[in-house]
Amino acid sequence: MKTIKSLATVVILGIATLASAVEKPNTNVQPLNSDQLLVAMESGQESRMEVTIVDESENIVYYKQSSKPITTYKKIFDVSNLDNGEYTIELKVNDLLSERDMTIANNQILVGKPDNANLIPPFFGFDGEQLVLTHLNFENEKYDLEIYDNAGLIYKASVGNDTPINAGFDLSKMNNGEYEVVLSSSNELFSYEFNK
């Protein structure tokens, strides 16, 4: 049994190490004039890159994927054929997704700020004794971790604002039962449930 727990811990730490090696791509969406939009992406490693533009009814009005892994993508889009309205631009590099809001109205293209969402959700693992957390935290947000049982909050700690966040918690002395972990910042909230 000890070998299984040790193996589970090694697998969890391996995944955490691999996740911490992922680099956030640089993305830029910028209006050039009333009809044209520049979309650019750059990654530190060769990756497949995708651009999707979705209208407010969630219909895809444009989709393009690079035919092979590349490190840089730049394209000027002519949006003169799009109706006035709200759109979402989705930029995807491997499994990392960034979204930008775009409004076309009154001969103008307005592009929202980059989303503040971390592009990859955190990884939680529990091997029966140890809770492991890895979060890339590209935006360097300050996170708190809380653990709840059926009666309410039983543990709270700050896990900081590192990039990445790697933390482990010894839960071997906790009673058997159902638990929920909540990882939160001022902009994000993630949860993970487990049984002990």
Image (cartoon, rainbow, N blue to C red):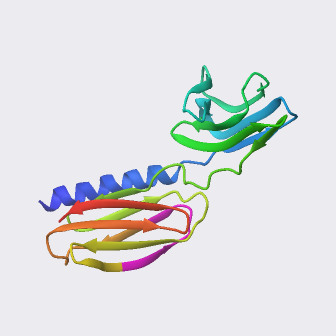
Magenta segment, prevailing SS (helix, strand or loop): strand
Q: Is residue 165 magenta?
A: yes
Q: Which residues are magenta?
A: 156-166
Which residue corresponds to the image point at 21% horizontal and 72% vertical from the top-left? Answer: 150
Quarter of the image where one finds residue 16: bottom left
Q: Is residue 19 above or below residue 177?
A: above
Number of labels in the image equals 0
- Of residue 39 and residue 10, the one placed in the foreground of this image is 39
- Residue found at the very far right of the displayed protein: 33
Quarter of the image where one finds residue 37: top right
Residue 65 appears anywhere in the view? no
Residue 83 appears anywhere in the view? yes
Query: Looking at the picture, how far across and down is residue 114, in whole percent?
Result: 67, 50
- Of residue 95 and residue 146, the one placed in the foreground of this image is 146
Query: Looking at the picture, how far across and down is residue 171, in whole percent?
Result: 25, 73
Query: Looking at the picture, how far across and down is residue 40, in whole percent?
Result: 74, 36
Which residue corresponds to the image point at 29% horizontal and 66% vertical from the top-left? Answer: 180
Quarter containing the N terminus: bottom left
